[in-house]
């Protein structure tokens, strides 16, 4: 089984680069107020990422991801806001999904891969949009700069997935698909609340 291909196929149906919200961001079409809402809401999800890495017993990357929460807080601060409790229903579902999937190693691997495999490309796109179209403090950029060339997480996950017993493979793929859907739906929720 070509695990990478199978997982990437699941993700491709919900490729976040194709989401209208990220497309509007990279074209400079989102108002700053919308970026602010995104920073508040999505930050609640970013804060859950270390939990997944703890579950798969990778304290080194978990510690890295904890530092990245502070970088997200700087992004929010540059927009004159803070990470807050999720209010948008689809973001709440994303948080519930993360809590559920990050609680067991096999599901955590699939869920983390759904997020980490997409992150370099989405970070590059968002960073380019911020630089070209938004007159914001430089503090909004480091989170995206760091993640625009951060492929080692996805590679580490694939290595661990490959080492799992074959009976866990279906669980990993299902978790990847479930997280991919939840990530897409969360962006839809933010987009619908802010842009329509």
Image: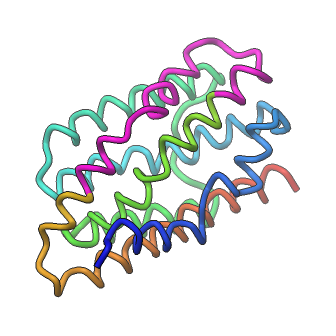
Task: Give the percent coordinates (x, y) of residue 193.
Answer: 77, 56
In this rendering, would 35 be left or right of 175? right
- Tell me where residue 169 sits by quadrant: bottom left
Residue at x 59% of width, y 12% of height: 138
**Residue 46, placed above or below residue 2:** above
Task: Give the percent coordinates (x, y) of residue 171.
Answer: 28, 81
Magenta highlight: main SS: helix
Kindly give the residue lying farthest to the front in the view shown.
Answer: 2
**Residue 107, placed above or below residue 85:** below
Residue at x 55% of width, y 43% of height: 121
Residue at x 60% of width, y 71% of height: 13
**Residue nearer the viewer, 43 or 87:** 43
**Residue 11, placed above or below residue 142:** below
**Residue nearer the viewer, 62 or 116:** 116
Kindly give the residue lying farthest to the top in the view shown.
Answer: 137
Is residue 153 located in the magenta-colored stretch of the structure? yes
- Tell me where residue 79 sits by quadrant: top right
Task: Give the percent coordinates (x, y) of residue 10.
Answer: 49, 73
Task: Give the percent coordinates (x, y) of residue 187.
Answer: 65, 56
Residue at x 76% of width, y 15% of height: 135
Highlighted range, magenta? 128-157
Is residue 149 located in the magenta-colored stretch of the structure? yes
In this rendering, would 37 be left or right of 24? left
Q: Quadrant of the C terminus?
A: bottom right
- Tell me where residue 52 sits by quadrant: bottom left
């Amino acid at each position: 089984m070509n695990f990478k291909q199978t997982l990437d196929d699941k993700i491709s149906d919900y490729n976040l680069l194709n989401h209208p919200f990220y497309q509007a961001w990279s074209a400079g079409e989102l108002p700053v107020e919308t970026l602010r809402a995104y920073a508040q809401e999505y930050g609640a999800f970013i804060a859950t990422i270390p939990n997944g890495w703890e579950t798969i017993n990778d304290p080194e990357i978990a510690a890295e991801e904890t530092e990245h929460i502070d970088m997200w807080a700087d992004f929010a601060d540059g927009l004159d806001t803070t990470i807050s409790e999720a209010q948008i229903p689809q973001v709440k579902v994303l948080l519930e999904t993360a809590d559920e999937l990050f609680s067991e190693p096999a599901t955590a691997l699939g869920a983390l891969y759904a997020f980490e495999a997409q992150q370099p490309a989405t970070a590059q796109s968002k960073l380019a949009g911020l630089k070209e179209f938004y007159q914001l403090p430089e503090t909004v950029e480091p989170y995206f700069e760091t993640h625009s060339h951060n492929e080692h997480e996805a590679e580490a996950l694939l290595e661990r997935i490959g080492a799992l017993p074959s009976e866990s493979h279906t669980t990993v793929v299902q978790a990847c698909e479930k997280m991919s859907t939840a990530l897409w739906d969360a962006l839809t929720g933010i987009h619908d609340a802010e842009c329509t």
